[in-house]
Image: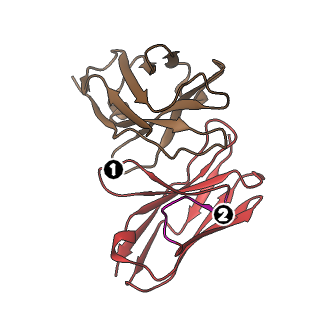
Chain colours: A red, B brown
Amino acid sequence: DIHMIQSPSSVSASVGDTVTITCRAGRSISTWLVWYQQKPGKAPKLLISGASNLQSGVPSRFRGSGSGTHFTLTISSLQPEDFAVYYCQEANNFPYSFGQGTIVEIK
Amino acid sequence: QITLKESGPTLVKPTQTLTLTCSFSGFSLTTRGLGVGWLRQPPGKALEWLAVIFWDDDRYDNPYLESRVTITKDTSKNQVVLTMTNMDPVDTGTYFCAHRDSGGWSAFWGQGIEVTVSS
């Protein structure tokens, strides 16, 4: 399987800040990378597929980029509803490994 | 619209077999490219895919679970069933089923079912 490493594991930020989360794959996965947001007690919500394709209904302040082994999720102008845990996931090779998650918390 | 819902026991004893059912609507698992999978999340930890089954009956189970997991589908009932043998307290967590699009993403998830393994 492909090991996915996310960083940082947590970040403290204020409303209005910009946050960048990095995800590295153990080997090239092209753009087979998705990003999820998860809030306590809820199922993950798909934000971005194909490394950079914003899902319908997801605010444009979320942006994904990257290919190969290095990917980023950038959240601009952080809003109160964005405080959550974010996961990257490799989407082409079972067991479709997840990163360990990044907690975005209020400073 | 697409919906999925997990059902099954919320408490199992160590060494027992867990059987969970994912009932879905809004799509057919006979549609080319689609799949349904099971994932789990231990308390405070990351998500993990357990198994996935596709429209053509191709299926994968997580090799780290050492053949404890089986996934099957009943297309007439719109259900996917997960069985997991020899349950252990470390298997405690929330179990989700999810729709897998042909493009590899999962936009639709069940609400999850919390399973506790305890004697």
A31 sits to left or right of B94: right
Query: Residue at left 37%, top 42%?
Result: B42
Per the image, label 1 sits on a secondary structure element best described as loop
Circles 2 and 1: CB atoms closer than 8 Å: no
Is B77 rendered above or below residue B50?
above
**Residue type beneath disc 1:** Lys
Provide the residue designation for mark 2. A52
Depth order, front residue of B106/A84: B106
Chain identity of mark 2:
A
**Residue type beneath disc 2:** Ser
Per the image, label 2 sits on a secondary structure element best described as loop
Residue B64 in sight from this viewpoint: no
x then y, percent, for residue B99: 51, 36
Query: Residue at left 54%, top 44%?
Result: B106
Q: Which residues are magenta?
A: A51-59
Residue A82: name its quadrant: bottom left
Provide the residue designation for mark 1. A42
Dot 1: within a 10 Å radius of its alpha carbon, few (fewer than 14), some, or many (20 or more) residues? few
By secondary structure, the bulk of the magenta-drawn segment is best described as loop
Q: Does the segment drawn in magenta span residue A44?
A: no
x then y, percent, for residue B102: 66, 38
